[in-house]
Amino acid sequence: MSEIIESIKNLSIGFNSQKGKQISILRNVSTNIKKGETVGIVGESGSGKSTLALAMMGYIKQGLFPLKGECLFKSEDLLKMSSRQLEKIRGRKIAMIPQNAGQALTPNLKIGYQIDEALRLHTDLNKTERDKKISELLNKVRLPSPETMAFRYPHELSGGQQQRVAVAMALAGKPDLLLLDEPTTGLDVTTQAHVLELLRFIAKDTGTSMIYVSHDLGAIAQVSDRIVVMYAGEIVLEGPARKILKEPIHPYTYGLLKSIPKLSLAGLPASMPGSQPQPGSINEGCSFYDRCNLATDHCKKNSPDLEHIKELDTNVRCFNHKELINQNNNLQTSITKKSNNSEEIEVLKLKDVSISYAKQKFFDQLLNKISDQNPTVKDINIDIKKGETIALVGESGSGKSTILKSIAGLLKTKDGQIKFENDRILSSDLKMRNPNDLRAIQLIFQNPDESLNPNHTVEQILSQPLKLYFNLSGEELKKNIIDLLKKVRLGEFYMSRYPRQLSGGEKQRVAVARAFAAKPDIILCDEVTSALDVSVQAAVLNLLQQLKEDLGTTYVFVSHDLAVVRAISDRVAVLYQGRLCEIGPSQNVYKFPSHPYTEVLLGAVLEPDPDIKPKLVAEDIVEEKPPEKGCSFQGRCPRKIGDICNLEVPPWQIGENGNAIRCHINIDELASLQQ
Amino acid sequence: MESNLITEDKQKNKLEKAFEILKTMASKPSGLIGLTIVLFHVILALISPYIAPYDYKAISPNTMLLAPSAEHWFGTDSLGRDVFTRTILGGRTALTVTFFGSLIALLWGGLLGIFCGLVGGKIDDVVMRVVDAFLSIPWILAMLLIVSLLGTSTEVLIPALGFFYGKGIVRVARAATHDVIAKDFIVSARARGHSNMSIIWNEIIPNVRDAILVEGAMRWSWMLLGFSSLSFLGFGVSPPTPDWGLMISNARGLMSFAYWSVIAPIVGLSSLIIGINLTADAFAKALGIDRSTKAPV
């Protein structure tokens, strides 16, 4: 039995509401962290997971205070320590790696200096020893050329590299415990896989205990030995990672795992009804009662205790967990969507579209032309059929949102044409488009907090398109708004609410309703689910699919998440640096042979399954500009064959299964290489 | 049951909302003091003609420069007029002129700022450089020029003051608009094909209104000082109209032996300015705008 280094006992943290009531955010949390183990704390936003992690280093956010319980670090209560005492522990004994390293690093100090600062504070080394230690640390976090890296500024590094520097700084004091608060959330898929790999290596190499806080079960699955699942401020399930992920015995965890789209499964994930209760709203009974399909009257009245189950080595907070074990539920199921009912009519055609962000030179401005030889997006040819869902996939900087904006008319194209219905060319200038074309193409944005006017009620928000396109007013307008709300499964009483009174999922539903208010032919979805919690994401995806089946709308779906794309789309186009790499029916894109870039992306996807490890094929270098000549992926390609890749744009090859790949390697050869 | 007490603030109509804001403002001592002072001055301005004990323009050689007494509470001035009467009447003109002046400043400054922020580009560049150029002109000299050309009637003073104090509001409105137009709901309205007017009216104004109103309230107190300065220099309202600036100007030579004739208008003027300032600050806090984080313009 290994030594326990931190122990949380009956911890409750809360705040005083305006009405003077005490509201707890954490309720009776108890857990132990053993030496050398990595504990994943998982939960949706508002579940109290960050509050718990911060309390573990004796930090409590302003406005909050501990109601009861203690945080024992090596048998000393962190919550009772003075700030002087805490200073000695933070950084030396417990270190923290923040979510956004780009913001956590001081922008105008060189990174070597910043690591040196940590060393000076937490160790007794002299100058030369510290210098040696800096390059040792930079080496350990696998940054390229650690000697020169120390002389760079944070902005000269990519997001993944910045996160590595943050890890190096945290390791400077040789801490016993590392706290990681969503350390890979803002990163691209391939970078995320690399950082997780590094963290796993460091945990093994240094024997440091880690607490990994994340909403992403995929990331948690890759690093954790033990998983703690939080819901509404309580621990609902706790146990060895494998057991939690393979045989979840709490209905919430079970639903959560089912609502994650998986690469191996076509079709939409099942969604959980409802949303997490607000702090302070639970008076009696189980906090998951409203959303649970196993709930009985007993659950409504009595709140379950955390119960230890010996054979599984798991703690669970549920009366009916045995039912879940007996049911022998299969996590690998999904809702099958209706097969592609798209007709063969092409509704939107992108022909040789290029888009440039380059600033026009004065002379070009006069002639109103753009002369950029190496535009951000180049030569995009996609024909979109009526009623299909086509997904544009790629990492940040792949130009997927840029293409979406130019379809919507928000960005001018440099070359090429966008043709709509019967080969009519759509002007790339919004003001030149006729009202009917504007109505036909609608946008849904990533973040509903920003896409809904905070000073409008839901009624006002939905009436905007109805008034503009259909000139509705009075009773008719109201009837239409109620209809729209019904379509997105919201009740009539939502009309008078403001966006701030809605949950994230409800807001996105309103945004969906606004897009459908225009009775559009095409809806452009820009990362519509990436700001949402997993269980809500599944519900929104299901809603979009249902609406599409009912109304025959065409979706252009932009996402960085390959699993989400797999779930919703009929066809997938993979983009790298603004150039198409591969396009084809979605079930084929996810099968080999595929473009080397698709291969890299698929390898890096994190599945909530400890048996599926990401395959790291390519380096996670960030390229700022597309190459001027040759293949767009030449810089990172693991299968590069030689000069031809640098010089010539690869040809399109169409495989047996109908997906087109742009690569110099013969498609059959690619297939045998990837087997 | 007290459920969802965080998200569930009930739907309120406009009047209730305004009342709510007033209540929040009055919940802090500084806001309460400010509101009381402003309210006091406004009420005084409304009822002063009916409660004034003497005629404000009655000159009498028998009562010249009398010290404060039971008969003349604040004493009399060099022409024998009652200082109390003139002081309580003196706020009327100042309040009227500056209130309507501020309204004009808010209107043109706010709308121009929002427009510039929205359209951007060349138009924005040109307009903002013109505004900058105006900001560099010493306003008091320009005002003197206008007043000496067109006269000192309120019909001239209100638009002139409104114009000069609106320049700063242009910048605030433009900055606030810039914050808002980057948001997706504006992009969404644009993509739907709404006209610029509709975007300004429906999407921008509700979101920048608060910032502009607070700025307007601050401008009001500055304008009050400006207006009194004009009167002091003899370019504001003309005698014998009772006005604080004018009273201070007339009595300043006699300060050494007849302090009462100058103290009353000074207290009147400065208390009103302080009151408006405190109110504007409380207003900003009640709306959730922290003025200290706004760029100084």
Image (cartoon, rainbow, N blue to C red):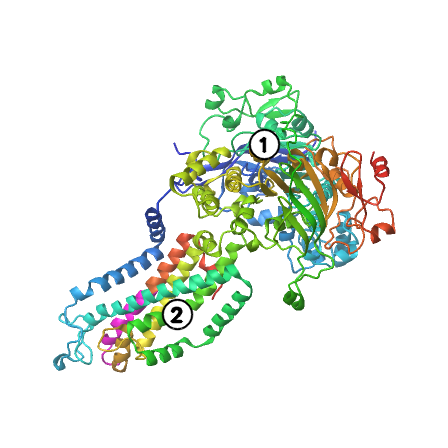
Which residue ends up furthest to the front in the rendered image?
A422
Which residues make up the magenta segment?
A: B255-273
Q: In the rendered view, would you say A339 is above or below A646?
A: above
Q: In the rendered view, would you say A191 is above or below B61?
A: above
Q: Nearer the viewer, residue A379 or A310?
A: A379
Q: Residues within 10 Å of mark 1 (few under 14, many from 20)?
A: some
Q: Secondary structure at mark 2?
A: helix
Magenta: predominant secondary structure element? Answer: helix
Residue A270's disc is none
Quadrant position of residue A57: top right
Give x and y (percent) for residue A552.
Answer: 58, 35
| Residue under disc 1 on the same chain as residue under disc 2 | no
Quadrant position of residue A321: top right
Q: Identify the chain of the residue marked 2, using the numbered disc in the image.
A: B
Give x and y (percent) for residue B26.
Answer: 33, 53
Amino acid type at mark 2: Phe
Q: Quadrant of the C terminus of chain A?
A: top right
Which residue is at 64% across, 50% downward?
A402
Which residue is at 34% across, 67% downward?
B101
Foreground label between 1 and 2: 1
Give x and y (percent) for residue B83.
Answer: 20, 73
Residue beneath label 1, please? A549
Q: Residues within 10 Å of mark 2 (few under 14, many from 20)?
A: some
Amino acid type at mark 1: Glu
Q: Disc 1 to disc 2, how far (Cα)?
A: 58 Å
Q: Nearer the viewer, residue A644 or B292?
A: A644
Which residue is at 70% across, 35% downward?
A586
Residue beneath label 2, please? B163
